[in-house]
Amino acid sequence: MGERAQSEQLLAEKNESEELQTPESTPVPKETAIPSKIVKSAKISESAKISESEQTSKKSDKTPKPKKITASPENHETDKSQKPQESAAQNDQNIQNSTETIAAAVPHPMIDLSPEKLADYNYLLGQFYIVDSNTEADAVQINAEDFLKQDLKITKETDTPQILIYHSHSQETFADSREGEESDTIVGVGDYLTQLLTENYSYQVVHLKEQFDMAGGELDRSAAYDYARDYLEPYLQENPDIQVIIDLHRDGIPEDRHLVTEINGKPTAQILFYNGLSYTTSKGSLDYLPNPYIQQNLAFSFQLEYQAAQYYPQFYRGIYLAGYRYNLHLRPRSLLLEAGAQTNTVQEVKNAMEPFADILDKVLQG
């Protein structure tokens, strides 16, 4: 699951906010590509009320503890000098017809996934989780047996939207992103995930492209989760059949790290799941950020990582547990996914959507 955070620091709390200010929420350097204005989804109400009560941002470098497994040539967390030199201009052509050629995965776990081992809380925590210093968890809340018993299946026989993909941080870009190209941002990654889930797995998917992290034409993440929540709540009321919500991000890590492995012969960015517990060590339970679905959220991310551990053991970095909510209260099957980081290429992150779509389907179909 990578390395643990090299230096933990308590997240500064401010005005009882939902999310906290971190380096990931500050303005990006000038050389970082910021796409031109993205067309808003017609299905989102532009008159939705915006609350200032919740701040945005996540811990910037969510670096997991190393896996206790034998080294494999499949895993390539390298420095930037070793990244593929494929330009972003080739991305669209490279993924053409790729939905028709994705190889079927076979189980090849690299850690012990037996019920006996997963019942060991310390083993479970060490192999699957990274706990931020601003929160805490215990064996009652983090219980693999309970998580695996939860039925998260959904049916595909429907004409109404089932899966919603959106981006609290729509302006996130990658090492070779071209300025002004939506396809080179995290939104473009969401487009490819939508294509995979629709064409390969026959789900009904909605991809919202609202810019929750832009204000007055400028990058501003200070209230992105508030804006997202206030748009999503009425949207979900209008679309009650949506059962899965994915907030798709990329991570922010030190510039000398490169989160990449090889899957089906392709350089593939590694992923990190992110859960909020609405509990901090300094304030205890955050009653102003209620989430009735915390255990279901945890079960969802665990079942996804459990499938990844079986079929793509070098693909996942861990499940990061943090103290706040991150809009995961909107549905039981809510997920915040970090796909790669700013040091990955666009193609590496789009490649990651192929194994992710596979493990998502395995969970949703049981």
Image (tube, helix red, strand yellow):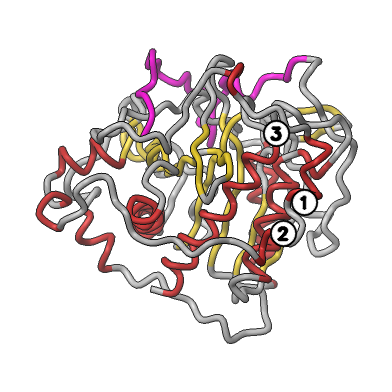
Q: Mark 3: which amino acid? A: Glu
The answer to whether residue 41 of the structure is visible from this angle is yes
Q: Quadrant of the N terminus?
A: top left
Q: Is residue 349 above or below residue 81?
A: below
Of residues 282 and 319, the one drawn nearer to the viewer in this rendering:
319
Q: Mark 1: which amino acid? A: Lys
- Between disc 1 and disc 3, the foreground one is 3
Position of 176 compared to 267: left or right?
A: right
User: Is disc 3 surrounded by few (<14), some (14 to 19) or many (20+) residues within 10 Å?
Assistant: many
Of residues 359 and 331, the one drawn nearer to the viewer in this rendering:
359
The residue lying at 18 percent from left, 50 percent from top is 140
Q: What's the CA distance linking mark 1 and mark 2?
A: 6 Å
The residue lying at 69 percent from left, 72 percent from top is 238
Of residues 96 and 341, the one drawn nearer to the viewer in this rendering:
96
Q: Mark 2: which amino acid? A: His
- Residue under label 3, please give it: 172
Q: What's the CA distance linking mark 3 and mark 2?
A: 16 Å
Tell me the SS state at disc 3: loop
Q: Which residues are magenta?
A: 1-29
Give yes or no for residue 23 being in the magenta stretch.
Answer: yes
- Residue under label 1, please give it: 209
Position of 276 compared to 79: left or right?
A: left
Give yes or no for residue 14 being in the magenta stretch.
Answer: yes
Kindly report the secondary structure that dominates the magenta region of the rendered protein: loop
User: Is disc 1 surrounded by few (<14), some (14 to 19) or many (20+) residues within 10 Å?
Assistant: many
The residue lying at 73 percent from left, 42 percent from top is 212
Residue 37 location (% of width, % of height) = 89, 40
Tell me the SS state at disc 2: strand
Q: Cβ–Cβ below 8 Å for labels 1 and 2?
A: yes
User: Is disc 2 surrounded by few (<14), some (14 to 19) or many (20+) residues within 10 Å?
Assistant: some
Dot 1 or dot 3: first in sequence order is 3
